[in-house]
Image (cartoon, rainbow, N blue to C red):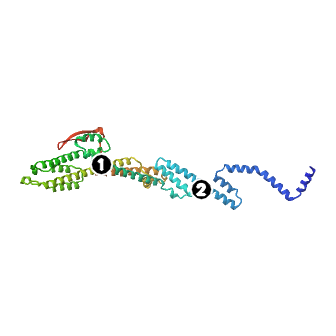
Amino acid sequence: MARFGRSFLQAATQPAYMEGLFTAAQQIGEAPAKRRQMGMLRDMGSVERADYMASIAETPQQLMQATAAKNEAMRQSALTSLNGLEAARQAAKTDTEKKRIEGIMSRVAVQAGVDPLSIAGRTQKEQDATLQREMAQMALEDKERQRQEQTFIQAYYAVPENKREAFEEKHGKGPFSDVINELREDKARDELFNLQLGNARTKAAENAAMKKEPLPTSTLRERIEDSNIAPELRDQFLSELNDIEEPNFEAGETWDPGERKLAIDALESLNTAVRNEIGREVSRKSVIRTDIRRLEKEKTKGPNFREIQAMEAEAKDALDTSFFSDPTEEEITAEATRLAALAKENAIQELIDQRYAELGESPEEPATEPEEEKEEETKQIGGYTVKEVRGS
């Protein structure tokens, strides 16, 4: 023990030794403060921690490091916020809400080091892409429906008279009910003409007296005149019918067998052309009616962001009636939405009116009546009994 005391006293007389003891004692005293500092830093956020390190920086280099750390922390925080906002935008129920979030995202993008232009217009691009997909799908559906209608029209004309009523009963309430209603009378005329033409062929072969028998041109003429085809095409068909000349029976002229056959073939060809054109006209009207239903459905939808944005200046002018306060962004958006909805409704209604005009109908008169409001009447066409569906 005495030896240790002497050794300590000898060392204590050396300055370096005493300085080491002082440093050790100082570090022991500072240890609790450093532990508290480390705990405090752990509890701080990344931006707050960078601010604290900048506040205690003792050298320019330490200050630069703290500033760089803060900038990176802010960028990462902004990126995290941007991802969260994007999730909220996608989950938003309305386009207006999506656009509002998109505006916030554009401002946050600057802090995140992201180009704001990559954010702006994102909602509209999605709307445009959705609209393009819907239009492409509708075009495919329209094309497929036209193909199906043409097939159905051909099948309907080919149904024998003794099976027509059963065919109409089966398909009269299906997707082609409009086609049946449009073609019911014309099919009866088609049947009558084919029957008369067939009789003319048969009797001509059996009886030489048929040299003085006229062809059923009046039946075909009546069919053309009562058809729904375009007036210019109707005139063309009538002109072709007039070109099929018959002998002047009153003057004693008779059919030459070859001429009669050529005339019958020409009548049959013309009748087929009339039938096909009537079918195309029915299909054209069906497409218009489908378009009207689509427009009516679109009219019930609210305006999209682009339509609302186009009305913002007008909405602001309408609301800015005071020198003391400006309308809020929410008020401008609400008014722009109202104006856009009104403009969209008027524009669509104008298109609907145009489509009805193409049909030759009035918008107040629906193209088809509910089944329970319909009644049937019978009508005689060339000896055939035809059921005519009429609205009550």
Q: Nearer the viewer, residue 12 or 174?
A: 174
Q: Nearer the viewer, residue 208 or 42?
A: 208
Q: Marks 1 and 2: CB-CB under 8 Å?
A: no
Horizontal side of residue 90 vs 182, given as left or right: right
Q: Is residue 162 above or below residue 253?
A: above
Q: Which residue is mark 2?
A: 75
Q: Amino acid at mark 1?
A: Thr
Residue 366, image quadrant: top left
Marker disc for residue 76:
none
Residue 384, image quadrant: top left
Residue that lies at the very extreme toward the bottom in this rendered image = 60
- The residue shown at (66%, 57%) is 66
Q: Quadrant of the C terminus?
A: top left
Residue 365 seen by the camera: no
Residue that lies at the very extreme toward the front in this rendered image = 206
Instruction: Select label 1 or label 2 by which is in front.
Output: 1
Residue that lies at the very extreme toward the top in this rendered image = 372
Q: Secondary structure at mark 1?
A: helix
Residue 74: image location, x then y, percent: 60, 55
Marker disc for residue 151:
1
Q: Amino acid at mark 2?
A: Arg
Residue 105: image location, x then y, percent: 53, 53
Residue 95 seen by the camera: yes
Residue 288: image location, x then y, percent: 31, 50
Q: Nearer the viewer, residue 331 or 51?
A: 51
Question: Which of the two discs, 1 and 2, labels the residue nearer the N terminus?
Answer: 2
